[in-house]
Image (cartoon, rainbow, N blue to C red):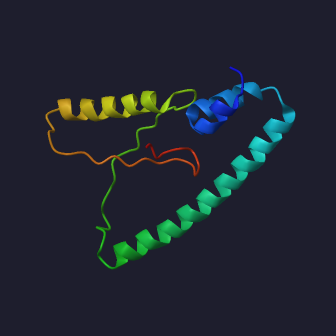
């Protein structure tokens, strides 16, 4: 796929996938991607550490049940998938849960690295 102004203007998963494909063999791109990835991981770990302090405080104050055990995460490999394909996987999982006789509402919490497009407009 040719990189065009139109494609770059989309600023979406299609743009990201095309750029990754275009520069896949570039050592400069790989080096830049590693540096940026490492910076994101460091920032996200700092955020996680701060969040844990808040959670521990809330448990100590009785705002959160200290014995609460959250459901396990459902990991979804999003590599190369469009946002619609990822949404279909999520909805499919929720539908499976509901088919087990649970017709209550659902809460979906999206987790992932900063800047990875977890918000969909």
When asked about the image quadrant of residue 91, the answer is: top left
Q: Considering depth in this image, is 50 or 14 the residue closer to the camera?
A: 14
- Point out residue 114 in the picture as x, y percentages from the top left corner: 58, 52
For residue 30, side relative to residue 96 (left or right) = right
Q: Residue 78, relative to residue 55: is it above or below?
A: above
**Quick one: quadrant of the N terminus?**
top right
Q: Residue at x 65, y 53 (%)?
A: 41
For residue 95, side relative to residue 46 (left or right) = left
Q: Residue 69, relative to residue 72: is it above or below?
A: below
The residue sitting at the top extreme is: 1
Give the tally of numbered discs: 0
Q: Residue at x 51, y 31 (%)?
A: 77
When asked about the image quadrant of residue 65, the answer is: bottom left
Q: Residue 24, relative to residue 54: is it above or below?
A: above
**Quick one: quadrant of the C terminus?**
top left
For residue 45, side relative to residue 92 (left or right) = right
When asked about the image quadrant of residue 44, the answer is: bottom right
- Point out residue 42 in the picture as x, y percentages from the top left corner: 67, 58
Q: Residue at x 19, y 45 (%)?
A: 105
- Point out residue 55 in the picture as x, y percentages from the top left corner: 41, 69
């Amino acid at each position: 796929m040719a990189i065009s102004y139109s494609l770059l203007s989309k600023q979406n998963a299609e743009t990201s996938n095309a750029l990754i494909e275009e520069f896949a063999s570039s050592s400069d791109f790989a080096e830049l991607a590693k540096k940026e990835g490492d910076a994101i991981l460091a920032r996200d770990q700092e955020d996680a550490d701060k969040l844990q302090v808040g959670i521990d405080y809330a448990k100590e104050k009785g705002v959160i049940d200290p014995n609460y055990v959250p459901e396990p995460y459902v990991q979804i490999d999003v590599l190369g998938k469009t946002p619609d394909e990822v949404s279909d996987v999520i909805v499919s999982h929720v539908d499976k849960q509901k088919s087990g006789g649970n017709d209550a509402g659902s809460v979906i919490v999206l987790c992932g690295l900063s800047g990875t497009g977890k918000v969909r407009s």
